[in-house]
Image (cartoon, grey):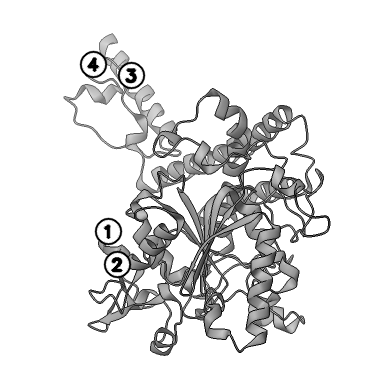
Amino acid sequence: MKVKTDKEDSEKNRSSDHTCLSFKFPSVPFPDNSSSKHGISENGFASDTFSAGSPRSRHKLTMLVLKLSLVLIVVLALTGSFLWTISITTSSRGQIFHSHGYRRLYEQLVSDLWDIGELSLGPARLKEVEFCPLEYENHVPCFNVSESLALGYSDGEEYNRRCGHGLRQNCLVPPPGNYRIPLRWPTGRDIIWVANVKITAQEVLSSGSLTKRMMMLEEEQISFRSASLMFDGVEDYSHQIAEMIGLRNESNFIQAGVRTMLDIGCGYGSFGAHLFSKEILTMCIASYEASGSQVQLTLERGLPAMIGSFTSKQMPYPYLSFDMVHCARCGIDWDQKDGILLIEVDRVLRPGGYFVWTSPLTNAQRFLRNKEMQKRWNFVRNFAENLCWEMLSQQDETAVWKKTSKKSCYASRKPGSGPSICSKRHDGESPYYRPLEACIGGTQSSRWIPIKARTTWPSRAKLNSSELQIYGNFYVLLHGFGCKISLNQHLGRK
C-alpha cells in the first residue's frame, strides 16, 4: 500500500512537471520503457527539454536568439569603431581625427552602422523593405544628372558626386529582368551577358575610345576578344607605351616600378584587363552614365572600377597613390581651367610615375595649320614642364611624361613659372572629395618615395619595420575609408 502511494505521488509530481513545461513547451509522450521518461538520458545527462517544444515555440526561440545576436554584432561594431578612432587619434597625436574630412567619415560610419542595426531588428522590420520601382534599376546613390541640371550645374559639374541630406529610401534595387549569373573568371573577363548591362547598339558603334572595341556574339553575349589587330589593338598599344618608356615590352612594367595604374575614362576596361595578366592592378574611373556605363561594363567583367568626376573635386584617392595614370581619348580637356586638372593628376601620381595621354591633340603634325589646336597642345606641354614632368616620347597620338623624383626640381623653376607648392595646411591626407587645389601636393609627405626606389612586386606585399612606420597609419586610415565606402554603397542601394 505504501509502495502504491509513493508511486501515485511520483506520477503526480511528474504530471505537475509536465504541466509547468507545457506552459511554453507542450509535452510529448514517451514510451514507458524509455529512460527519457524521467528526463534523463542513457549517458546520465539531462535530455534537451526544448526538443519537446512545438515548432511555433522553437521558431520564437530561434528568432529571439537571432535578434540578440544581431544586437550584439551592432554593439561590437560600434565599440570597434570607437576603439579604432581612439587608437588612430593617439598614434597620430590628434591630427587626423581633427581633420574635417575624417570627422565626416567617422560620423557617417556610425550612422551607417546604426541603420544596419535598425534593418536587423527582426522579421517585422524586414517586411517593410520592399522592392524599389523599376526606374531604380540603374540608380546610383549621390549621382543624379537630371537633378544637378535642374539645380543649375553645367560644364561637366552636373556629373559630380552630390549626396542629398533627405531621408534615405530603404528598398531593394531589383536586378534586370533577364539577369544571368556571370561566367566564371577568366572567361567572364572577356565575355559578358548582354542582359546584365544597359547598353544600346548605337552606343557601341559610336564609341570612340581605343579601349571600347568589342563585338556581339549570338545576340546574347558581348565579347571583348578579337583576332583582328585592326579591331582590337590593345596588346600592341600597351607594347608601344612600354617602348616609349624605354622598356622591352609591357611585361617589364613591374621591373620599372609600375604596379598600380589609374585609367581615366577607361572605356570598357580592356586596357586594364590586358595588363592584369602582367600583374598590373588597374583602377577604372569614369563619369556617371545612365546607359552604356563604362563602370558598369567594367565591373561586369570582374575588373575594379568606380564612378568619379574631378571637374571641381579631387579624386577619392590619397596623395601619391598610383605609379601610372592613363587617359586614352578620355574626353578630358587638360588645357582647360588653367591646368588644375593636370595638377590633380600630379597629386595622385607617385614620384617617378608616368602620365600617358592618347589624343588627336598630341599629334601636332595633323594641326600645323590649326592655330587653336597648336595653342592647346603647347599649353599642355609647357604646363607639364612646369610641373617638373619630363616628356619621354611622343608617337602618333600618344605622349608619355615622367614625374620628377627629386623635390629640388620645384625650387629650380623660374619664379612664377608654375604652380606653387601646397602649404602644410593644404597638403593633408584626407581623400574625402576635397575641392581641387591649384598647388603641387605630396611634397611634404613621408611617402614621397620614387617608384624605382620601392621594393618591386611581389616583395612589396610584405612591409618591413621601416616601411610600416611610413605606411602603417596610412593603410589603417585607407582601410577605414574603404569600409565606409562599402557601407555607404551597400546601404545607398536599399
Mark 4 and mark 2: span between their CA atoms? 61 Å
- Between 35 and 104, the residue placed more toward the observer is 104
For the point 55% across and 73% down, the residue is 139
For the point 75% across and 70% down, the residue is 338
Mark 2 and mark 1: span between their CA atoms? 7 Å
Q: Please, is residue 172 above or below residue 110 in the view?
A: below
Label 4 CA crowd tier, 10 Å (few <14, some 14–19, many 20+): few
Q: Earlier in the sequence, mark 4 or mark 3?
A: 3
**Which label lies toward us, 1 or 4?**
1
Label 1 CA crowd tier, 10 Å (few <14, some 14–19, many 20+): few
Cβ–Cβ below 8 Å for labels 4 and 3?
no
- Name the kind of residue labelled 2 in the image: Asp
In the picture of the structure, the residue carrying the numbered disc 4 is: 43
**Which of the 4 image quadrants contains residue 331?**
bottom right
Mark 3 and mark 2: span between their CA atoms? 76 Å
Q: Residue 372, how many percent across, how many down?
A: 67, 85
